[in-house]
Amino acid sequence: EDQVTQSPEALRLQEGESSSLNCSYTVSGLRGLFWYRQDPGKGPEFLFTLYSAGEEKEKERLKATLTKKESFLHITAPKPEDSATYLCGALRETSGSRLTFGEGTQLTVNP
Amino acid sequence: DSGVTQTPKHLITATGQRVTLRCSPRSGDLSVYWYQQSLDQGLQFLIQYYNGEERAKGNILERFSAQQFPDLHSELNLSSLELGDSALYFCASKGASEAFFGQGTRLTVV
């Protein structure tokens, strides 16, 4: 069964304090690894898709990387407006295209 | 704006009732996913349609059903509602690469 696990569940940072969020996955035939940001009561906002091990993508203070078993979302010098829940989802290649998500990491950045 | 439209935004209904949630995907996207998100929980995959056909099924209850129409919009039908069905329901529209979510329908069963 497909499994996506995110850690930590919650993370508190001071403004400017860089850190990383982890997403480990067990998916039969990974077709893509997705990162989203979700604010309370809102729909997830697309950030990145990664397709193969070694791939990296950046957007402002965020950088996502992918290995064969996990993905990291690195946050450099975060600001309070980066506070949100970050979701990781894995898309399988076989038996349809099921997109399975982890439970998310709730990030709080204090000023 | 993701380009994915979900209606209604809010829905309050009584136990035992039936409701229909609607999703219009982004122009050109053939694939629609439905998810349930209960309070402070992750996204639970319900079902996926691609160009009108069911492609993948998650932990969707028998009381729930979905379909995708020829114009590619999708509907999620929830029947015999229980208090525990109260949640945010999201659809996501996927093209060749990215998957974009709508703003969700908040269902409250009283």
Image (cartoon, helix red, strand yellow):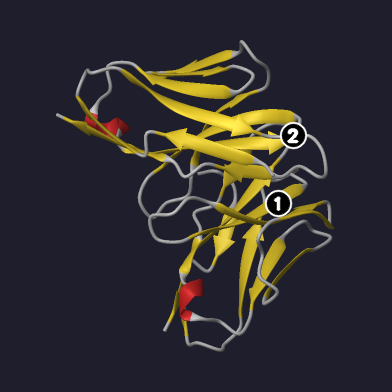
x%, y% of residue A20? 38, 21
Question: Would you identify the image quadrant in which residue A100 lies?
Answer: top right
Question: Would you identify the image quadrant in which residue A30 lies?
Answer: top right
Disc 2 vs disc 1: Cβ atoms closer than 8 Å? Answer: no
The answer to whether residue A66 of the structure is visible from this angle is yes
State which chain disc 2 sits on.
Answer: A
Q: Measured along the vertical axis of the image, is residue B45 above or below residue A106?
A: below
- Which amino acid, by three-letter code, is at mark 1? Val
Q: Nearer the viewer, residue A35 or B31?
A: A35
| Residue, disc 2 | A28
- SS category of the residue bearing label 1: strand
Q: How many marks?
A: 2
- SS category of the residue bearing label 2: loop
- Between the C-alphas of marks 2 and 1, the distance is 21 Å
Split into 4 quadrants, where in the image is the N terminus of chain A? top right
x%, y% of residue A33? 61, 29
Q: 10 Å neighbourhood of mark 2: few (<14), some, or many (≥20)?
A: some
x%, y% of residue B13? 48, 83
Q: Measured along the vertical axis of the image, is residue A45 above or below residue A82?
A: below
Q: Nearer the viewer, residue A17 or A43?
A: A17
- Which amino acid, by three-letter code, is at mark 2? Ser
The extreme top residue here reads A54
Q: Nearer the viewer, residue B87 or A11?
A: A11
| Residue, disc 1 | B32
State which chain disc 1 sits on.
Answer: B
Q: Which mark is residue A36?
A: none
Q: Residue at x 68, y 17 (%)?
A: A52
